[in-house]
Image (cartoon, rainbow, N blue to C red):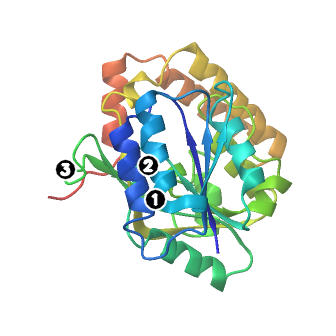
Amino acid sequence: MFSVLISIYHKEQPQHFNTCMESIWDHQTLKPSEIIMVEDGPLTAELDRVIAQWQAKIGDILKITQLAQNVGTGKAKNIGLQQCSHEIVCIVDTDDISVPDRFEKQIAVFEEDSELVILGGQITEFVEDVHSPSGMRKVPLSHDALRKYAERQSPFNNMTIAYRKTKILEVGGYQHHMWMEDYNLFLRVIAKGYKIQNLEDILVYARIDNGMHARRKGFEYIKSEKQLLNLKKELKLQNPIHANILFLIRSTFRLLPSSMLGKIYNTFLRKKVEK
């Protein structure tokens, strides 16, 4: 038995959300025991209608918490995590599409390895049509490779992860870190010495905004990079000199023109999908 945790807010497109729900219920070879959904602030009437339809369809499987105001993804997930009834929790983003055997594969690995705390996988990215992918984000598989990789960038595709609830709560859950709550959490889990792993399989088709990566710039992002630097030093996960150099490099990228930043991202950080 396992839980699915979802946070949704008013900017989500109703059609995208409905497709996401179909992928984690209608099309899954192993269905979740419960779906914990946190409404992060008031939603649109259209989203409310889609949620009501799913509530009527799957009944008590869908458990909804409504927040009076938008508190952000990290805080919303913390609230939802407390309400998950099962030890294994699978994270789902409301505009992505999970492959049909995603949960079956992940739960099987957790059942075989009692020491595993976080398990993710690979993603294929698309803009509008899932059948016309724009790229892939491939991450390392083994614990040691992921620990090393985490020094430079996030070791997981956030929308693919599943984890053990008690261990995540033990390290403090999600903490405020603008645009990097997940990365922050992963570093704290690694610092505890907990076992992490990625599957080589594609688990999620991730819907992306075509210009999203190019807009990840400016001084607010640099402040977030500085918080990341301080966390790495506090956790002693990286040589301080190397951490400072990486901070300077990443911060420099945040000051580049959007067009150049987008080209760098697509050229070096994503793999093209073979047609």
Residue 35 pos. (x, y %): 59, 58
Q: CA gap, disc 3 to disc 2?
A: 29 Å
Task: Say if mark 2 contacts mark 1, CB within 8 Å.
Answer: yes
Q: Mark 2: few, some, or many residues within 10 Å (few <14, many ≥20)?
A: few
Residue pictured at 62% horizontal, 36% vertical: 73
Reading the image, the residue beneath label 1 is: 57
Left or right: where 168 falls relative to 97? right
| SS for dot 1 | helix
| SS for dot 3 | loop
Residue 33 pos. (x, y %): 60, 69
Q: CA gap, disc 2 to disc 1?
A: 6 Å
In this picture, is 140 found above or below 225?
below
In this picture, is 158 found above or below 246?
below
Residue pictured at 42% horizontal, 73% vertical: 101
State the quadrant of the C terminus. bottom left
Q: Mark 1: few, some, or many residues within 10 Å (few <14, many ≥20)?
A: few
Reading the image, the residue beneath label 2 is: 53
Residue pictured at 36% horizontal, 19% vertical: 258
The residue nearer to you, when weighing 192 against 126, is: 126
Residue 250 pos. (x, y %): 54, 30
In this picture, is 241 found above or below 236?
above
Q: Mark 3: few, some, or many residues within 10 Å (few <14, many ≥20)?
A: few
Q: What residue type is labelled 1?
A: Lys
Residue pictured at 72% horizontal, 67% vertical: 86
Task: Say if mark 3 contacts mark 2, CB within 8 Å.
Answer: no
Reading the image, the residue beneath label 3 is: 132
Q: Can residue 204 be seen in this view?
A: no
Q: CA gap, disc 3 to disc 1?
A: 30 Å
In this picture, is 259 found above or below 176?
above
Residue 123 pos. (x, y %): 40, 56
